[in-house]
Each structure stands twice: as C-alpha cells, then as structure tokens.
Image (cartoon, coloured by chain):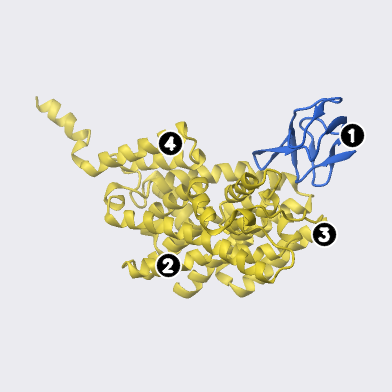
Chain colours: A yellow, B blue
Amino acid sequence: MELLQGMWTSMAFDNLYWGNFVMWVIALTFVYLAINKGFEPLLLLPIAFGILLVNLPSEIMTPGEGLLWRFYHYGEEWAIIPPLIFLGIGAMTDFGPVIANPKTLLLGAGAQGGVYVTFFGALALGFNIDQAAVIGIIGGADGPTTIFLASKLAPEMMGICAVAAYSYMALVPVIQPPVMKLLTTEAQRKIRMKSLRKVSKLEKIFFPIITVIVITLVVPDAAALMGMFCFGNLMRESGVVDRLSLTAQNELMNIVTIFLGISVGATMPAEVFLTTKVIGVFILGSVAFCCATACGIGLAHLMNLFLKEKINPLIGAAGVSAVPMAARVAHKMGSEADKKNYLLMHAMGPNVAGVIGTAVAAGMFLSVLK
Amino acid sequence: MANIECPMSGKVWKILVKVGDTIAEDDEVIILEALKMENPIFAPEDGVIKEINVKEGQQVTEGDVLVVLE
C-alpha cells in the first residue's frame, strides 16, 4: 500500500490542478483543428504540443534548466527567431506589385490604423500601455511581429497574443469578407484594374536596399525585423545566392518554426492562460483585425476621390499583413462580383506593404514605450 | 479572332480545352495556379480554339497569350 502511495506521489499528479486539465483539452482541440481542419497546422501543431508539455508536471519550463525554457529564452526573449522568420518571408516575397504600383504602399500603411484604434481600446479596458501595444499589433495579423513586440514589451502576454494573431491569420477568410461587403458596393467590387507594368530586375534589387535605409533612419527600432526582411529580399532578387535564399525560405524557416511553435506553446501554463484577460485579448484582437480591414478599405475609397484611374477598394483590405491570405480574399470577392476580375496580383501590393507597415508600427511602439 | 491573355503570373494548372473545341463566352478554358490558389480563366468571347500555346505545369506571366481563338 505504501509502495503504491509512493508511486502515486512520484507520478506527480499532486502538482496538477483542474486548470491544467482544461489546458490539455485546449491543446488537444488545437491538435484536432490543425490535423482535421488544416488551421495553420505548421504553427498550431507545435504550439499545441508546447501547451500540453508545460501543463504536465515537468520541469520543462524551469528557468535556467528546462529544455523549452532554453528554446524560449534564446529564441524569443532574445528576439532571435522572429527576425529570422522575417529573413525567410523577405526571401519569399516578390515586391513587384508594390514597385509597379507604389500607391499600394499607402494602403499597407492605412490598414495599420486598426492597430492604433485597438491600442487605445485596450488602454481604455485597463490593460497597461505595454500590453495594449502588443494587443494592438495583433490587428496587423502578423505572428512574428506580435511575438517580437511581446518579447520586448510584455513577455507575459506573448503566448496568448501569438495564438490570437495566428488564429486571426487562419480566420482571414471568415472575418474579412463581411466587413468588406459592408464597406463596398457591388459596382465598386467590380472595378477592374489595369494590368501591372513590368518591373525590371534593377528596381527589384534597389527596393530592399532603399527600403531598409529609409525605414531604419525613420524608425530605428524596426531595424531588427526590417533589416532581416530586406536582406532576405535582396538575396532573392540578386539572383546570385539562390542557395542562401532557398535555405532562408525553406530549411531555416522550418527549423525556427519548430522552436518558435513549441516554446510559444510552453508560455501558456494554465495559471497564465486561464484568466479573464485572455478573453479580452481575443475580443480586442478581432476588433483590431476588423478595424484594420475597414481602415484599408476606407483609405482606398479616399484615394479614389483623387485618382483618375480608380482602384478597387477591396485591395485596401489586403493591407493587413497576412500574406497571401488577405490578397486571396480580396481576389475572391472581386471575382465573385465579376468572374473575369483578377485582383490577386493587385492585392499583393498592399499585402506585402502591410508586412512592412506592421513591422514599422511595432518599431514605433518600441521607440515610444521602451 | 481573339487571344486569351494571361491576367496574372502563375503556373498553368489544367488546360480544359483542345484545339478545335468550340467554346462560348465565359467558358472556363484554363485553370491557372497563383499563390496556391486555383484561378479559372474564362473565354472573352465565343469561338473555336485554334492554338494552345502553353503546357500544363508551365510558368506564365501577365500578358502571355495562352490560347488563340478564331
């Protein structure tokens, strides 16, 4: 009998409370969503497993000792992984649509309005100023940027905000269309846009160089993200380092995604996750995201007042940085209104501009709040 | 006679017509894959397929003539 009792204690069930079991259910739900529903499985599966591990009686997140703590400490607290992901995204991104139609840069910036609206909303709801900034940035629907900003300003919010940002990225096709329908008329959705001009290789090489110089001079705190992003893009466009460019896009990206996912999951033990704050984060996150969509469309309408050649306001909604999901949504809604309307490449302009926009918004928060 | 031009860069995913087929306006002619999305390309007008200039799997860019109608 004593032996059994000893085993029971060593199995450490004692160290668990009901909250941990709730987290198991959440983790398993995420596993289910990743496998059966295909919701961002590359991220959700590692995150789910991290959640499960940290809610088992283990020392996996013990500072200075645990394995996942080390991943977390060196990867995220030191803010190494998000910039490496940006390196990969830069290497994947074709800036052609932005260069061909630089007006779309404005749309990418306009959608960041949602970030600031939510920032003030979160402040009003009693989050502190650092937390509010991280919640606001969710509106950009950019996972790595959210994690980056959280690591600098509010590490306690990282896990929750990362999950919120990635959930909204997966939910782009659900959240955006109603907002887009509400703010555009059928006739506006039918607007066809003139085909984009050809962009020369020289322009594509100069774009990342000029971008990094300008942005780093204006917002020095965006340098880590934008530096890696532009470097990745230069590797791609230079055409002479395909091996490096492909590694950044594929192997390196996959490797850091594993470390990122599992350790972000591990920042969510029950005592941190199961608070009323989490609900606030998710609600504010979706508000942020709808506002960003609306701001992008609003700005497109505004620009149309002055432009001779009208832009389709739907592409304004692609100013959030979920690439290429937001561009796909804009394209799909355009082709629903007129099936020979091909907006995809036009929407990629604001979409990739949105990535820059969100990184800049994060840099601005950092420079003000740090 | 009319050309069906490629509306955006991508990869030819499926060709749904053969030379000699008669097609009507708005028929799906080719499915183009761009950004992991399948995009049907529709016929701009009625006609008969005279030439198909692309193969499945081929990379195409905006403005390329995919199919010639007559």
Mark nearer the N terminus (3 vs 2): 2
- The quadrant in which the C terminus of chain A is found is bottom left
* Parent chain of label 1: B
Three-letter code, disc 1: Glu
Residue A327, image x, y percentages: 62, 50
Most foreground residue, A199 or B44: B44
- Give the left or right position of residue A304, taking residue A175 as reference: right
Q: Residues within 10 Å of mark 1 (few under 14, many from 20)?
A: some
For label 3, the residue is A202
Residue A119's disc is 2
Q: Residues within 10 Å of mark 2 (few under 14, many from 20)?
A: many
Disc 3 to disc 2: CB gap under 8 Å: no
Gap in angstroms between the C-alphas marked 1 and 4? 50 Å
Three-letter code, disc 4: Leu
* Parent chain of label 4: A
Q: Secondary structure at mark 1?
A: loop
Most foreground residue, A190 or A213: A190
Of tags 1 and 2, which is closer to the observer?
A: 1
Gap in angstroms between the C-alphas marked 1 and 2? 59 Å
Three-letter code, disc 2: Phe
For label 1, the residue is B70
- Give the left or right position of residue A84, taking residue A342 as reference: left
For label 4, the residue is A33
Mark nearer the N terminus (2 vs 4): 4
